[in-house]
């Protein structure tokens, strides 16, 4: 999955990669390293309500695609949902 490069702050540099995880033509996930620690922090609309659920995703196999993620789906500040790319196609299947 190639993703769509996004300049979030408008300064001319790419800040995030937008992903259409469910193939419906809209970007429903953002992958970016917001704190510079080398890990991809992501936002993803897990429940389809139009709002991104905060989380962290990891590229465990080094292919440049986040294949496991954990998310705060109820907004309490704790990660309570884990998702994985079970078949390696770049999509989170286990939602």
Image: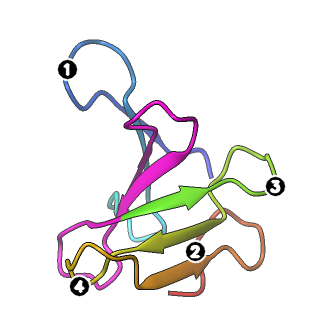
Residue 29 lies left or right of residue 38; in this view the side is left
Q: Is residue 78 visible?
A: yes
Q: Looking at the image, is mark 1 or mark 3 earlier in the sequence? A: 1
Camera-side mark, 2 or 4: 4
Q: Nearer the viewer, mark 2 or mark 3?
A: 3
Pointers 2 and 3 in contact (C-beta within 8 Å): no
Tell us which disc is closer to us: 1 or 4. Answer: 4
Marks 1 and 4, how far apart in space?
30 Å
Q: Nearer the viewer, mark 4 or mark 3?
A: 4
State the CA–CA distance, disc 4 to disc 3. Answer: 29 Å
First of labels 1, 4 by sequence position = 1
Q: Quick check: marks 1 and 3 in contact, CB under 8 Å?
A: no
User: CB atoms at circles 1 and 4 under 8 Å apart?
Assistant: no
Which residue in the protein does label 1 denote?
Answer: 10
State whether residue 46 is above or below residue 6: below
Q: Which residue is mark 2?
A: 92
**Residue 37, labelled with which disc?**
none
Give the quadrant of residue 88.
Answer: bottom right
Residue occupying the point 44% across, 50% down: 41
Residue 55, position as x, y percentages in the image: 39, 64
Is residue 39 rendered magenta in the image? yes
Disc number placed over residue 61 in the picture, else none: 3
User: Is residue 47 rendered to the left or right of residue 57?
Assistant: left
For the record, the magenta segment spans: 29-54
Secondary structure beneath disc 2? loop
Q: Residue 15 at x, y = what percent?
A: 37, 29
Q: Marks 2 and 1: in contact by CB < 8 Å?
A: no
């Amino acid at each position: 999955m190639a993703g769509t490069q996004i300049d979030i702050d408008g300064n001319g540099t790419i800040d995030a990669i937008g992903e259409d995880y469910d193939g419906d033509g809209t970007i429903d996930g953002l992958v970016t390293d917001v704190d510079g620690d080398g890990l991809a922090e992501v936002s993803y609309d897990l429940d389809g309500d139009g709002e991104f659920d905060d989380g962290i995703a990891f590229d465990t196999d080094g292919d440049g695609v986040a294949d496991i993620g954990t998310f705060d789906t109820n907004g309490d500040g704790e990660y309570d949902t884990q998702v994985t790319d079970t078949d390696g196609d770049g999509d989170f299947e286990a939602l």
